Image (cartoon, rainbow, N blue to C red):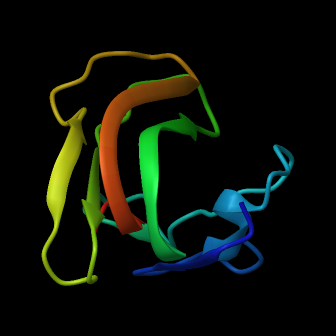
Amino acid sequence: MGKAASADSSQSGRLPSLANDGDSATRWCAADGNTGHWWQVDLGSAVALSGTEVRWEFARTYKYHVSVSSDGSAWTRVADRTASTATTQVQSDAFTATARYCGSP
């Protein structure tokens, strides 16, 4: 929480940093409803990761993937929900990785 975050776009008042501020009343939101948007967090240094939790605005089907990187250039996909049909508002993905960056670049 509270680490530097970036995204390809955002709605006014829905900045990337709001996705990991620890407040469930705030959120990042892409500028439009199109597919292909990305969000990522810079953890500051390489840390051990055991998974992610995504909280969506609505309970409906969302397709996404999670990737990690040590340098911000070479990415490894650690969770793949691109074929998901789940409609739960909170989705958790367990994995083990060590990385500085995490997101869906």
Q: Residue at x 15, y 27 (%)?
A: 83
Q: Residue at x 48, y 77 (%)?
A: 45
Where residue 74 sits, quadrant-wise, is bottom left
- Residue 24 vertical position relative to residue 42 in the rendered view, above or below: above
Q: Position of residue 91 (x, y in %)?
A: 49, 26
Quick check: 103 left or right of 53? left
Residue 67 seen in the figure: yes
**Camera-side residue of 95 and 21:** 95
Q: Residue at x 66, y 73 (%)?
A: 3
Quick check: 24 left or right of 87? right
- Residue 87 vertical position relative to residue 22 in the rendered view, above or below: above
Q: Quadrant of the N terminus?
A: bottom right
Residue 103 seen in the figure: no
Where residue 14 sits, quadrant-wise, is bottom right
- Residue 74 vertical position relative to residue 61 in the rendered view, above or below: below
Quick check: 39 left or right of 65? right
Q: Quadrant of the C terminus?
A: bottom left
Q: Position of residue 16 (x, y in %)?
A: 61, 73
Q: Position of residue 96 (x, y in %)?
A: 32, 38
